[in-house]
Amino acid sequence: MSGRAVLVTGASRGIGRAIATAFAAAGDRVAIHHRGSADLAVRLRDELPGDGHVVVQADIADPGQVRRMADEAAEALGGIDVLVNNAGVFFHHPITEVSYEEWQAAWRETLDTNLVGAANLTWCAVRHMRRGGRIVNVSSRGAFRGEPEGPAYGASKAGLNALGQSLAIALAPHGISVGTVAPGFVQTDMTNEHLKPPRGDAIRAQSPFGRVGLPEEIAAAVLYLASPAAEWATGSIIDLNGASYLRT
Ligand code: NAD
């Protein structure tokens, strides 16, 4: 079998789709993970360049489904060389506007998916990895800048950053590197509504380039962090926000 075995979560659309496409274009075999978008995932599998791509399904917030899915991906691809934790959710839940029940539901679902789900899948995937393995987490600018309308999202991504840094140290002796990308606004299904004028104009103006990011720009950085050349970049977090937020 040629190429590396790559598992990308939330790959049926948006940034995940661009990441899956970029790996396939580089000659790798991709396990396209989805939750409930089998049609989209199968269509993407059939469109990807190269062969050996597969579709796997799981609710990332369900630990049992995550373990089954990781095992299926490894079985189909002959191991896992690269894991990309991309699947994520954002809920609008401003503290002064939502009920206590809504507040708790937003925190629970966000953390279960964005942070605990990624941690669980990483535990499972590491057991299928050899030396040279790579884990790339898709975080967010919001981890640093704050997310006033979605505080659970910001906290989940800050947790994901810390998870990646802890595992970079824990997994280095096993020859596995862990990197993180932190995009600002990216044009995807998740953000389409927000990017309509006039609110979208203000969002585009956050960057001195006067635009938001493209999924392909995120995919390029993920490919770098997953490359053999990126071992020394382990533990790093790459900002991909067009200078819309410069952290110190
Ligand atoms: P998207 O909504 O298009 O894609 C997210 C994917 O995750 C979807 O395919 C969705 O089905 C999947 N997913 C969500 N919950 C799941 C669950 N419980 N189980 C399985 N799959 C689940 O959004 P996107 O913009 O492509 O986002 C991809 C990643 O990039 C997310 O982690 C997001 O937080 C991050 N991000 C996006 C932006 C942006 O502006 N679009 C900015 C920063 C970070």
Image (cartoon, grey):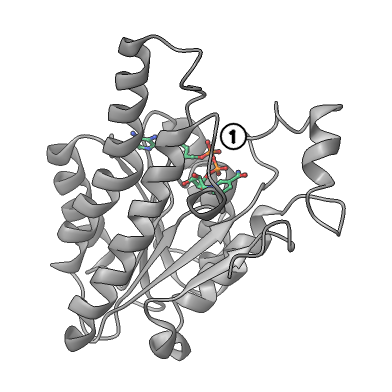
Left-right relation of 180 to 121: right
User: Is residue 142 in view from this perspective?
Assistant: yes
Left-right relation of 191 to 83: right
User: Is residue 89 in view from this perspective?
Assistant: no
What amino acid is labelled 1 in the image?
Answer: Met
The percent coordinates of residue 9 (x first, y second) are 39, 49
Q: Which residue is mark 1?
A: 190
- Front residue of 145/130: it is 145
The percent coordinates of residue 247 (x first, y second) are 60, 65
Q: Residue at x 85, y 59 (%)?
A: 208
Reply above or below: 108 against 186.
Answer: above
Reply above or below: 175 against 14.
Answer: below
Mark 1 residue CB less than 8 A from any atom of ligand 1? yes
Left-right relation of 164 to 29: left
The quadrant of the picture occupied by the C terminus is: bottom right
Q: What secondary structure is found at the residue carrying circle 1? A: loop
Reply above or below: 99 against 123.
Answer: above
The percent coordinates of residue 179 (x first, y second) are 41, 72
Q: Residue at x 16, y 54 (%)?
A: 71
Q: Residue at x 15, y 40 (%)?
A: 63
- Front residue of 67/73: it is 67
- Front residue of 108/77: it is 108
Labels in figure, total: 1
